[in-house]
Amino acid sequence: MTAGKARPKVLIVDDNKENLDLVTYFLKPQNYQLLTAGDGETALELIVREMPDIILLDIMLPRMSGFEVCEKVKKNPATRFIPIVMITALKELKDKIRALEAGADDFISKPFENVELLTRVKSLLRVKKYHDELEESNRALQRMDQFKEELAHLIVHDMKNPIFVIQGNLQMMGMGLNDNISPAIKKYVDRIDRSTKGLLRMVSNLIDISKIEDGTLKLNYELHIINNLIERTIQTFTDYPEHSKKKINLSLNPGIPRCKVDGSVIERVFDNIFNFALTNVAPDGNVTINSSFDDQFITVSVSDDGLKIPEKYQDSIFEKYSQVEIKNEGYRLSRGLGFTYSRLAMEAHKGSIYLDTKNKTGNRFVLKFTLS
């Protein structure tokens, strides 16, 4: 019984007019909306059109048996939760079992008492009412979640404009600085620049995650040399003072073939993984980046000798909603949803990314690009 409905709607299906009249007589004082059908096909048409709250269904019907009607109702996602009471004169246990196998919620054997009928109907209508209220609550929650997602997406999208303005002004300031500028001022300008780049990366990740999940992200495929994307991305980190004493070991196979990818998207994936690796190691720590290939894949691995991601989180670090739980326990795995973005972006390229759980020390991320 859906919200706002004044009276429960009961469909009685029987080809015998006397039986229809009898059931109607018993139910009429309850102020139900009563519908009737004399055969299975008519019943199905009524069910789809009227969406009754309960169906009282005779087994022996013309054109289509009650068993068949019941099966069709229960197989239809729109009607499967409508309770069905099978009314039968059949006494064999196998017939009752068949009724239950067809999806019937209850059955009554003829002849029946009016008290028995009313009790079964009231009980199942109560269950249906609870189900409908729960469904309505779920729909309301889904609408609210969708609204929050859309609002968050709008806010995140609008954040890009002021970030671009800040970056543009920083570039103008940088161009105006001369060699005699105070080292402290230059240091602060550089810090602001790096922070805005990091913020822009997080905002871009969130926007693209939403696009990937919605299927609206358009990838600009071009032939790229993966090694070049790696080198270009890692260069941005070598200019950071906090990474100046860290050792970055590049072991890139020079024979790697070109691969069709969206270069800007993959650079952002590398940016997320490299950022974690470099942030995770000690001031004099090591990060090693390897590339190799075979007939099917180009493989890139990123290893660090820093703090190992706890084993209980190793299978969930790429899941969007697990990030909150992990960070609540004090582990900062990546900025924003960097890992989640990386997984979705690699999957959008028909590739993959995973954490090598067999790695003994530190962490080792493996990215695989499909060669088509």
Image (tube, helix red, strand yellow):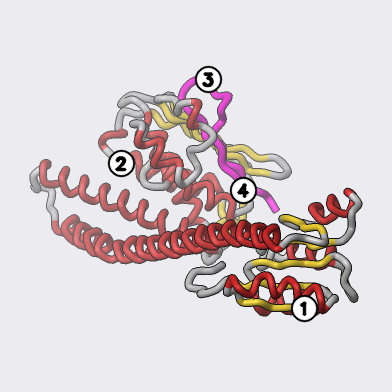
| Residues at marks 4 and 2, CA–CA distance in whole angstroms | 30 Å
Question: Does residue 105 appear anywhere in the picture?
Answer: yes
* Residue 370 is covered by the magenta coloring: yes
Q: Position of residue 61 (x, y in %)?
A: 87, 71
Q: Nearer the viewer, residue 148 or 220?
A: 148
Secondary structure category for the residue under label 2? loop
Mark found first going from the N terminus, 4 or 2 = 2
Q: Position of residue 81 (x, y in %)?
A: 65, 61
Mark found first going from the N terminus, 1 or 2 = 1
Q: Which residue is mark 2?
A: 239
Mark found first going from the N terminus, 3 or 4 = 4
- Say if mark 1 contacts mark 3, CB within 8 Å: no
For marks 4 and 2, give the one nearer the viewer: 4
Which circle marks residue 360 in the picture?
Answer: 3
Q: Which residue is mark 1?
A: 37
Q: Which residue is mark 4?
A: 351
Relative vertical location of residue 292 with respect to residue 32 in this rendering, above or below: above
